Image: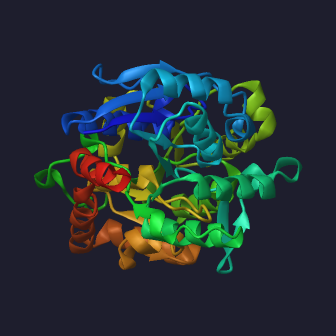
Amino acid sequence: MPQILYLLNISNPDKLASDSGWIFADLLAPAMIDQGAEFVMAAPARVSDGRAHFERTAVPANKYRARFDPGMDELVALIKRTTPDIVIANQVEAAPAVRAALLEAKSDARLAGYCHYLPFSTEHGGLVRDPALNDRQLGWPVWLSFAAGLAACDRILVHSTTAATWVDDAASHAGADITDRIRVVPPPRDERLVRHPDDLTAPAPDTTVTGIYNHRLYQHYGTPRFVTLAEQLTTQTRAQLRVMDLFGTRSAERVALDDSPERMRTNLAALPGVEIRTDRGDREAYRRMLEECQFGIAPFRPGCPWAMSVIDCQSMGLPVIAPRLDWFTEHIAEDLLFTTDAEAIALVERLTYDEAFYLEHAKRAMTSTAALHPAMVAARYLEAVA
């Protein structure tokens, strides 16, 4: 089996529970090692499995440094030290530098890029630049850098069929043909967040139900839309809402780039029937918080290719209602999709009062994550990068 060098940028090494990239690596590493791979983690923080080798890398000062300053000298030295068979670049924009470093290090390792974050979203059926990566008009250079990274990779891994379509389209816009290199490999679920099917119960009659919103509170995640919906749900239904504070106190540098999480958190905390909670990075505490809820709400994020928090809810048997867009239309049951706030309110009402409907979708939610067991995803991953 191969030796894998897994390159991962971590923006908040002191808040690993809020970094989905690290969580995926932490779940995949032991599963890959169990299947015979040698796993070298090159990142600002190590994974939990002590069998994985670790190469510490610097934390980039900001999201643009992560994309435009991969550190060629360090990459060459890293490749020479670890002599990988496969290099996985989780920051696709860095892939051309990785390819050049492989050349300089005289390595013939295969280069795979995992499209963990897409620097574009959809609007009216077309691709648009991600506003979160468009400070001082950097959106187009980021897009071109992403396309260059795609062109540099031997294999390109994406979360979903929806993401595959967008990535192929984005590459075509830049003149790159990558169709034969794309592989769909969804991230794994966290087995610590899997409820036993026998424990699924519908909400009791005439009781308050709790919905959870466990997504990042950035404005570009559609949080203002959620704030509007939250106010209506808590005043027009029997639902109260639990909003997870994933970031806590962020650095002044990150707030200066985008203060929307702080503003959205303040707006939500002011609403009656909405509570702000944090698990402080404790997965057992997070599980207990999910167990106390009856349904989940997906984000209104344009261009969403995957949502780990949605999978967390579903693996715990929580039906998730979602806006009718992007990956949600691929993954969420049609009966739980909505277009207007009125439709969302009606769905919550039905989940509250219709026991058969609730249990049907609680079971379907769990079933939809069954193929995401880390061992199964690791096997797909290793096959995709081979």
Quadrant in which the N terminus appears: top left
Considering every residue shown, the one lying at the far left of the view is: 198
> Image point 43% across, 33% down: which residue?
5
| Figure label count | 0
> Image point 21% across, 64% down: which residue?
363
Colour scheme of the picture: rainbow
**The quadrant where residue 368 appears:** bottom left
Image-based side of 1 in relation to 58, left or right = left
Residue 347 or residue 37, whichever sits in front? 37
**Image position of 113 with respect to 5: above or below:** below
Residue 154 or residue 200, whichever sits in front? 154
Residue 261 or residue 40, whichever sits in front? 40
Q: Is any part of residue 208 visible from this angle? A: no
**Image position of 266 with respect to 226: above or below:** above
Residue 247 or residue 24, whichever sits in front? 24
Image-based side of 123 in relation to 226, left or right = right
Q: Residue 369: give x, y in percent of width and height.
A: 27, 58
Q: Residue 365: give x, y in percent of width and height.
A: 28, 62
Image-based side of 126 in relation to 344, left or right = right
Q: Is any part of residue 32 visible from this angle? A: yes
Q: Residue 62: give x, y in percent of width and height.
A: 72, 33
Considering every residue shown, the one lying at the far front of the view is: 106
Q: Residue 223: give x, y in percent of width and height.
A: 64, 55
**Image position of 249 with respect to 260: above or below:** above
Considering every residue shown, the one lying at the far right of the view is: 136
> Image point 41% across, 62% down: which residue?
183
